Image (cartoon, rainbow, N blue to C red):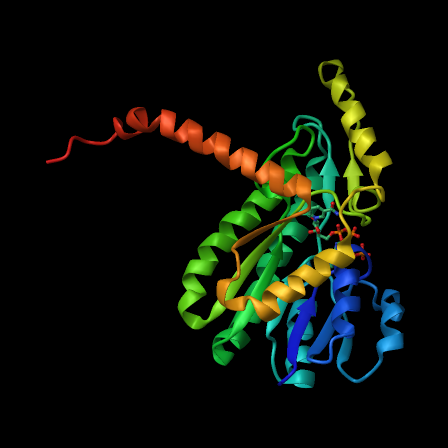
Amino acid sequence: MTAKTWLITGTSTGFGRSLATFLAKQPDVNVVATARHPEQLSYLDEFDHGQILKQRLDVTDRDEIAAAVKATVDKFGALDVLINNAGLGYFGTFEESDRDQVKYMFDVNVWGLVDMTRAALPTMRQQHEGTIVNFSSIGGLFSFPTLSFYHGTKYAVEGMTESLAKEVADLNIKLMLIEPSGFRTDWAGRSSNKAMPKIDDYKQFADFIEGNEEGAHHEPGDPDKAAQIIYDQVTNHRDSLPLRLPLGKIASDTAINKYEQTLADFKRLHDLSASADQPEK
Ligand SMILES: NC(=O)c1ccc[n+]([C@@H]2O[C@H](COP(=O)([O-])OP(=O)(O)OC[C@H]3O[C@@H](n4cnc5c(N)ncnc54)[C@H](OP(=O)(O)O)[C@@H]3O)[C@@H](O)[C@H]2O)c1
C-alpha cells in the first residue's frame, strides 16, 4: 500500500503530539509534524525512519504555511490528510474579555485553519483525494459561560467546515470535525488566557474559571486514544467518515442532549416559524 502523507498543526503537546507519535509508528504513513518551535519535536527522534518531516509552522504566518505545504509535497509527493489541530482557549466574561487576546485566538483557531486549508486544497484537488480533519470542540456545539469567544471560534469552524464539505464532496475531499470534551492536554492551562471577573455582577463565574485551570491535566479524555480513533476513522472508515465526531463521554452526552432539546424546540415552534412566509400562490 502507498504510504499516505499526513500534515498536523500544533504537534508540540496535546492532541497534536499524540497524533504525531501514533502516526510515526504506522508503516503506511508519512508524517509532517509542525510546530512553532520545531526543537520541541525531539520526541520524534526515536522514530527517525525517513517518513517523518519536522517543519516550523506558526499558523498565523501565511509564508510559513505555504512553505510547509511545499516542503510536504517536495518530500513525499502528496498531501493526503491535513489535521488542523493548533488552537488556543480564552476564559473571561463576554464584557470583560481582552479584545486583542480574543482577536489573536480568532487568528489562530479560525484564520490559521482557513489559511492552512486553502493552502492544502489545490494539492488535494489535483490529487482528486484528500481528508481534512478540523479540531472543533464540544464547545463548537454547546456553550458555557466565560467561553463566549472560544465558542465563537469553534462555531465558526463548524459552519465553515460543513459548507466546505459540500463544495468539495464531488472532488473526493472529505472533512471531519473533532468535538472533544475535556482531554488531558495543555489547553486549559498554558494554552488558555484568563480574565478573572472584576465586575461584581460577574463574580460568581470566578469559580468556573479557576476550576477549569485547576482541572487542567486531570480531564477524563486521553489524547492517545483520540489519536488512534482519528487514524482509524480516516484510514478504515473514510467512505463513511462522520462530519461530526464528538470525543469523550461528556462530549457525546452533551451533543445528544443539545440536539434533542433543540429538535424539540424547533418542532414546537414549527407552525410559528412557517407562518412568517409569504402565502403560497
Ligand atoms: N484539551 C481539550 O480538552 C480540548 C477540548 C476540545 C477541543 N480542543 C482543541 O484541541 C486542539 C488542540 O489543543 P490541545 O488540547 O492539544 O492543547 P495543547 O496541548 O495546548 O496544544 C495546543 C497546540 O496548538 C499549538 N499552537 C498554538 N498557537 C499556535 C500557532 N499560532 N501556530 C501553530 N501552533 C500553535 C501549540 O503550540 P505551542 O507549543 O507553540 O504553544 C500546541 O502545540 C485545539 O484546537 C483545542 O481548541 C481541546
Occupied quadrant, residue 263: top left
- Figure quadrant of residue 208: top right
Q: Locate the N terminus and report the quarter of the image it occupies.
A: bottom right
Q: Quadrant for residue 59, please give it.
A: bottom right
Above or below, comparing residue 27 to residue 258 in the picture: below
- Give whichever of 203, 22 is nearer the camera: 22
Q: Is residue 65 left or right of residue 47?
A: left
Q: From the top left corner, tell me how far across and down residue 110 is, in percent.
A: 61, 51
Residue under the point 68% across and 36% down: 99
Q: How many marks?
A: 0
Q: Is residue 242 left or right of residue 196?
A: left
Residue 220, placed above or below residue 226:
above
Return the x and y of residue 104 as percentages of the image width and height. Answer: 69, 47
Residue drawn where x is 83% and y is 30% of the image: 210
> Against 165, is 120 above or below?
below
Q: Residue at x 54, y 72 (%)?
A: 130
25 shown above or below 193: below
- What is the x, y in percent for residue 192? 78, 42
Horizontal relation, residue 265 to residue 205: left or right: left
Residue, far top = 200
Q: Quadrant of the C terminus?
A: top left
